[in-house]
Amino acid sequence: MPREKKTEYFYLDDRAIAIYQRPNSSMWQARIVREDGNAFVRSTGERNFDKAVEWARREKMRAEVLTEQGLDPNTKSFKSVAELWLAAIGRDPTNKPRKISDYTKIVKRYHIPYFGKHKITQITQKTLADYEIWRAAFWQTGPGAEQREETIRRADGTAYTREKKVASKGKGDAEDTVLRQIFKFAVNHDFLDGSRMPNIGQKTTRGDKGAVKRRPSFTKEQAKAILDYCNSFPDTQSEKLTYERLVFSAFIHLVLGTGLRPGKEHQPIKWKHFSLKIVDDVPHAYLTIVKETKTGTRLVRCDSFVWPMLSGFRYVSKFNGEDDFVLANQETGEAVVSFKRQFNTMLKALKMETDVQGDPFTPYCLRHTYATLKLNEGVSDRLVAINMGTSPDMIHRYYGHDTSVSRANEFNTDIDWLTLDAEKLKKLKRPPNPKKKP
């Protein structure tokens, strides 16, 4: 067998640049050594030697400039990170095909065409501001203006083509959500330092009449009724139903007692993620949220009613090993993806399917309830935000459910300007019921 041809290197600029060709390739490659001694390899994209040398020298200068700015010249492009993220959500069985399709369309239509060649570390607030201008003009004078037709896919998988409609082509919240998730993916996979993550978009917080849209939550009395329901068991001989109630009860206690996000934050939880810590001689249970979730790894303090229930549940669970899922299907051991069916059954039994405004309750309202009750008890926005993995601004805007009715007694003080010389109002005693026998 003939010996493989040895690669020949051409060294330039005091050996800071090496130009070579791989076997069976006419494309020139470049190995570039930076001032700090670190080296990286790039394809020059050139078959002409002189042009390859020119490219390598420009690339070396670019790398030095990035290094001086504190940026890594070897970082991935936005396009490569976005494609890795799309592949990741495509592998996640909890993502519905329609969601994956919609997100893919957004990335390939808007984000990659604009940000694609940028390094993920080079995208700044100014870059995003310029993108907003480009996106606003996309369908009027930009690339979308040339599109005459659009393809619509039906739920059954079939598709048809129609004339393009431009009435609702403005930038939606979903586009910001997708872009935010791509950057969080970059942070979680060490493609981007968390301190360099830009502030992306601003979610709408006001309704048609300008009022802030509060998120539905249960009152303290309703929350207690929910826990009472979970701590009771159906009158049945079915082992399957009994275990389903136990797992559902563990889910309710966890979300109501930690404020975690139902769904992708509850599914990966394993028994090994819990720990007990002593703070000023007081024991506290903590849950470690795993890295692959929305906000990455964080330590969550559990309310005092959570761990006693979970430790009892662990004793009877069929899957109680350190590496087992806490909220596991008791037949398969797989994490339960959704508790929506049991949740709706519970609300129907308790006759509280909607809040006072008529808005339907969902499992996510347990998270809203955690925030609201903590705020009403005087816990600071910052502490609530830390535990829930969100920002104090989000807590302030979405989760405060105080009203002049719910906290009316706090208005009734000794310095009430209408009753300076009067005593504070006292609770009225109910008159005796004349029908009630003594």
Image: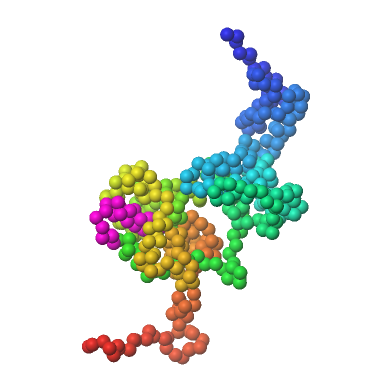
Q: In the depicted view, which residue is nearer to us: 422 or 437?
A: 437
Tag count? 0
Quadrant location, the N terminus:
top right
Q: Is residue 401 above or below residue 80?
A: below
| Main SS of residues in magenta | helix
Q: In the depicted view, which residue is nearer to us: 340 or 112?
A: 340
Quadrant location, the C terminus:
bottom left
Q: In the depicted view, which residue is nearer to us: 229 or 58?
A: 229
Q: Residue at x 69, y 55 (%)?
A: 165
Q: Residue 323: within the magenta?
A: no
- Asked if one can make out residue 378 in the rendered structure from this viewpoint, the answer is no
Q: Is residue 286 left or right of residue 151?
A: left
Q: Residue at x 73, y 33 (%)?
A: 58
Name, please, the residue furthest toward the top.
Answer: 1
- Asked if one can make out residue 212 in the rendered structure from this viewpoint, the answer is yes
Q: Residue at x 53, y 47 (%)?
A: 97
Q: Is residue 47 left or right of residue 216?
A: right
Q: How is the image coloured?
A: rainbow
List x then y, in percent, for residue 420.
48, 89
User: Residue 171 falls in which quadrant of the image?
Assistant: bottom right
List x then y, in percent, for residue 84.
57, 40
List x then y, in percent, for residue 383.
46, 60
Q: Is residue 174 above or below residue 74?
A: below
Q: Residue at x 40, y 55 (%)?
A: 339
Residues drawn in magenta: 232-255
List x then y, in percent, for residue 421.
46, 91
Name, please, the residue furthest toward the left.
Answer: 438
